[in-house]
Image (tube, rainbow, N blue to C red):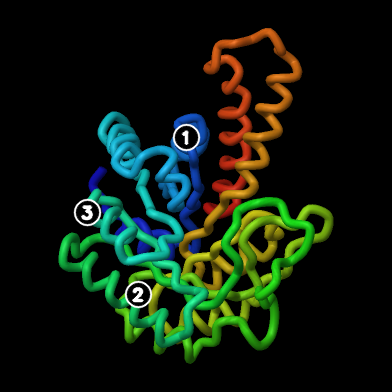
């Protein structure tokens, strides 16, 4: 693997495509995502939230991605998704992750700047090539099925990230990537469509900041908005809830159809295939395949 993540992101932007970022909680999810990407021949980012990496193991997650990079010489990268404290940022920087998402979105603007800059400075001191992402604008925290839009989330108008705010935030923190609030939400609504994205805002933020944008909360977003947002400046799209649902539904069916089966690799195989199928569909869209 000759290109680092920064080069892969730059390449995606020049092609007007986006890199898919998919969260995993175990090796089954990892294999599903990796097989989908490898079959299509596109780069992919594996995300592990604080809870996910506590479950897998911080260093174990790094070792799993290292093994795939080494065995297949493939552009698969590891991001420490949604990291809320300096100590937790420090541990993934020290563990050699490719990227870290610093989430100060619940903080005031000034507190978010201070927290994010402290993390950026530390990451740069340890690994100048590490990709550091900041968040500006609150879009929720949970990758789950929702009955309604959670309290505190604004999906249009005032409350979304503005180009001026974004520009100031990027300049003061030195981040490589910005995840703004542009109508997106974490999780996926059960019975009504997710809010539509403010594509003009995406375009204006990208132009104002000069850094690639990341779309969080991609699950449930309509295909048209994905395509438009990518053209407007989104270089990475996060998907989690959709593949969690695919995994759960396939596992439930597997247990129902084979109630006497006790071999985990047989019980879990349909879940891996379901994750692969869901991931493949999103990667085709993001890469215009």
Count of numbered circles in the view: 3
Say if 117 sits above or below 39 in the image: below
Q: Which residue occupies 46% across, 64% down?
A: 235
Query: Residue 5: x and y, percent?
Result: 32, 56
User: How many angstroms separate mark 3 from mark 2 (CA)?
Assistant: 17 Å
Left or right of 103 in this view: 145: right
- Where disc 3 sits, the SS reads helix
Q: Residue tagged by mark 3?
A: 94
Q: Residue tagged by mark 2?
A: 116
Q: Decide which of tag 3 and tag 1 comes sooner along the chain.
A: 1
Q: Are marks 2 and 1 in contact (CB under 8 Å)?
A: no
Q: Residue tagged by mark 1?
A: 26
* Residues packed near mark 1 inside 10 Å, few (<14), some (14 to 19) or many (20 plus): some
Say if 149 sits above or below 190 in the image: below
User: How many angstroms separate mark 2 from mark 1 (CA)?
Assistant: 29 Å
Query: Residue 229: x and y, percent?
Result: 59, 69
Q: Decide which of tag 2 and tag 1 comes sooner along the chain.
A: 1
User: How many angstroms separate mark 3 from mark 1 (CA)?
Assistant: 22 Å
């Amino acid at each position: 693997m000759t290109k680092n993540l920064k080069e892969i992101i730059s390449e995606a932007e020049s092609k007007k495509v986006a890199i898919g970022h998919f969260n995993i909680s175990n090796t089954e999810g990892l294999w599903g995502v990796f097989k989908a990407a490898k079959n299509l021949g596109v780069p992919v980012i594996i995300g592990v939230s604080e809870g996910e990496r506590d479950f897998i193991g911080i260093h174990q997650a790094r070792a799993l991605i290292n093994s795939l990079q080494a065995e297949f010489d493939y552009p698969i990268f590891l991001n420490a998704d949604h990291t809320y404290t300096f100590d937790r940022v420090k541990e993934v920087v020290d563990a050699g992750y490719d990227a870290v998402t610093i989430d100060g979105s619940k903080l005031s603007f000034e507190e978010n700047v201070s927290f994010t800059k402290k993390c950026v400075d530390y990451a740069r001191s340890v690994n100048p090539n590490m990709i550091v992402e900041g968040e500006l604008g609150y879009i929720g925290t949970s990758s789950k099925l929702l009955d309604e839009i959670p309290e505190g989330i604004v999906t249009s108008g005032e409350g979304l990230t503005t180009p001026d705010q974004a520009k100031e935030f990027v300049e003061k923190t030195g981040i490589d990537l910005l995840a703004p609030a542009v109508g997106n939400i974490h999780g996926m609504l059960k019975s009504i469509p997710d809010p539509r994205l403010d594509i003009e805002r995406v375009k204006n933020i990208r132009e104002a900041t000069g850094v690639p944008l990341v779309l969080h909360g991609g699950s449930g977003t309509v295909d048209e908005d994905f395509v438009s947002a990518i053209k407007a400046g989104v270089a990475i799209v996060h998907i989690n809830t959709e593949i969690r649902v695919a995994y759960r539904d396939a596992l439930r069916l597997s247990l129902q159809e084979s109630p006497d089966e006790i071999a985990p690799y047989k019980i879990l195989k349909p879940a891996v295939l379901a994750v692969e199928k869901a991931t493949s569909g999103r990667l085709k869209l993001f890469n215009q395949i």
